[in-house]
Image (tube, coloured by chain):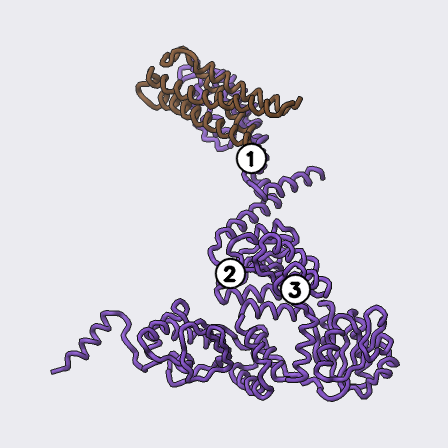
Chain colours: A brown, B purple
Amino acid sequence: MNPEKVVFGFFIVLALTLNFGFFIGEIDNPDHHHVWELFVVIIVNLVATVLKFGDRSHMGALLLATSLVAMIQLFAAGLIWTIAAHATAAGMTPAVMASIVSLSGGAMIANVISVVLLVIETFTLRR
Amino acid sequence: MARVRSRDQEAAQASMGNIVYLIMRRMRTPLLVLISTYAVAMAGMVLIPAQDAAGHPVPYNFFHAFYFVSYMSTTIGFGELPENFTDAQRIWVSLMIFASVAVWLYAIGTLIRLLQDVSLQRAIRERRFRRRVRRLRDPFYLVCGHGQTGDALVRTLTDRHEHAVVIDIDEARINQLKLDDHREYVPALCADARHPRALEVAGLQHPLCKGVVALTNVNESNLKIAIAAKLMHPDIRVICRADSHDVEANMASFGTDHIYDPFDTFAMDLAIAIEAPCLALLSNWLSGFEGEPLDVPIFPPRDGRWVLCGYGRFGKAIYRHLNEQGLSLTVIEARPDRTGMPKDGVIHGRGTEAVTLEQAGIHEAVGLVAGTDNDADNLSIIMTALELNPTLFVVARQNHKHNQILFERVGAQVVMIPSSIIADRIRVRLGVPLLSEFLTHARFEDETWACELVSRIAGLVEEQVPHVWEIQVDEYHAPALYRASQEGVELTIAHLMSDSHDRDSVLPAIVLMRRHGETRELLPDAQARLRMGDHLLLCGALAVRHSMDWTLQDPNVLDYVLTGNTRPGGWIWRWLAQRGRSEPNP
């Protein structure tokens, strides 16, 4: 067992599960999507991205690319939340919530691809 | 120690591929630590409530927490707080301030150390060099070894607007090259040319690479370069320096195009100097280093017997060439069983003792060649022989560069240094190909012709090696001449030779040769017509060349040279001039 692989797999899967947890619920209901969940999703995704740094294989490059996509989506979601909550008069409206959640949905698809790639890589190792 | 080695390996790999990966890999840990510290600090700030002006608890949100942690950890410290802190928050912040500042410094420190890393910098330099070579859009020569020879070759090439790429193993020489002011940009890399990868990086497989010149002072390296060049880019020209027959034969076996053997070349030059001193001097002057003082003529004695010490590679070459000239030679050799011997036998001995030299008849001899492969022996031979017979003409073979100062003092008229002989040949062949042809053809002329030319050259420049250059008379290199000849103007060499400031005076230069297609004409007549497609070889001062370039390129200057008019340049002035002529004053 390679401890590096355990940590790597752990963070990639955790990124997906947390992302799913944030995403699930009525899309425009702020009660169904907690800010702490988004915070943890962003942190775990950041860690997963950094863990993928420096892998020179083709698979590694693809994994990094999916992570970067997820990061862009999540950063956009966080930015929208911050601006809506602090810099607009209207505050958090259902429309804003919907766009935040749909952005995190996009990030989730990227995370799903990450996990699928990880599974494929594990199978090709044949050990 | 092990860590250092693995880093070097990493850097070596990175130089092949992507440096970004190396940076990312090394930054992985600092970034992870940074992210987790931020996360913990922010989480704490959000969990512990702050208080508003009235003292009611107000929770921090993530935006405020991020804002505060960002300026805390970078120690920017604005002193502006989103909400007032409670004591619980102050406790948390005083813990976090140490953690986050330390982590931030650690991350920045790692990044800076990474950028200062020698192996990484080398990788970055190599990458930049590779990119520059790849972007070359003109044919170029790959020069391996940037010693005196390489430097002179690169300068000659760039002066003719040809391109060169340089590899040298010595960092100092590469830095020197970068300081030098060349007319064309010369990409240079400090690398070991024995590694095929270094050659590949330097553009050996580039479609525009015209040739490889192996000039390092190590035979084995040159051999390796030649092999790599022939394998990696078979149709390329490979020019090599070789100091031994073995290496030479080895190089020739796989088709190296030009191999220069210093011994044979020198022996032939010596034979020419004996037969035709002026011709030897001519060749010496024209192919010397520009701006250096002219060599004094040497007159090796033609009548009388020569004593030749050492019958190795050098001795054999000298023996063959001098024998062809009809000179009589006495050979001294210590190990004739190993080297073989000429048909009229040898005198056994090293030549360092008076006995052996006397046996060889040093008292009646006119010349001495000290040609063993041992510098101490050669010096000793010369000193002993000159004591016995001070009138000897002495030719010395210098094997090692560091003995130069001794050979300068020993009293030899000619010192043969293998490396510089080759250097000159290659420099001339690549740099001024017409000069190479000229010198070959000049050998068929008689001695008085050469003596006359030598005295004319001596009159051109003051005790300095003249500038030798080529002119191509065609549309691209001489647009003014091209236009004039399209208009049907008869152009002669004399026009080219007249001063562009004062057409009545003649520029101090000599047209040495004219080539048109396959015909070659030495010292063409001044009244000879210039044709498009002519290649001219000239020598004179550098300033003359600049003056001549005006005539070649500027139609107005050419018009002045042809007719004496100073024609107005712009079309308005030309139109006014025409008006003035067509409307005579009432």
Q: Badge 2 sits on which subunit?
A: B
What residue is shown at x 78% (from left), y 75% (from top)? Answer: B379
Residue B163 shows which numbered tag?
A: 2
The quarter of the picture where residue B413 lies is bottom right
Crowd class of label 3 (few under 14; some 14 to 19; many from 20; radius 10 Å): many
Q: Badge 1 sits on which subunit?
A: B
Dot placed on the residue nearer the N-terminal end, 2 or 3: 2
- Disc 2 marks a residue whose amino acid type is His
Q: Residue furthest right?
A: B355
Check disc 3 and report the residue beneath it.
Answer: B241
Q: Badge 3 sits on which subunit?
A: B
Is residue B541 visible to us here? no
Give the CA distance from mark 1 to mark 2: 37 Å
Of circles 1 and 3, the one toward us is 3
Place of residue B459 in the rendered image (x, y in percent of width and height, measured from the top left): 53, 85
Dot placed on the residue nearer the N-terminal end, 1 or 3: 1
Crowd class of label 1 (few under 14; some 14 to 19; many from 20; radius 10 Å): some
- Disc 3 marks a residue whose amino acid type is Arg
- Front position in the image: A121 or B19: A121
Place of residue A68 in the rendered image (x, y in percent of width and height, measured from the top left): 48, 29
Of circles 2 and 3, the one toward us is 3
Disc 3 is placed on an element classified as strand
- Disc 1 marks a residue whose amino acid type is Met
- For residue A116, side relative to residue A94 (left or right): right
Q: Quadrant of the C terminus of chain B?
A: bottom left
Dot placed on the residue nearer the N-terminal end, 1 or 2: 1
**Measured along the vertical axis of the image, is residue B393 above or below residue B571?**
below
What residue is shown at x 56% (from left), y 28% (from top)? Answer: A51
The quarter of the picture where residue B529 lies is bottom left
Check disc 1 and report the residue beneath it.
Answer: B24
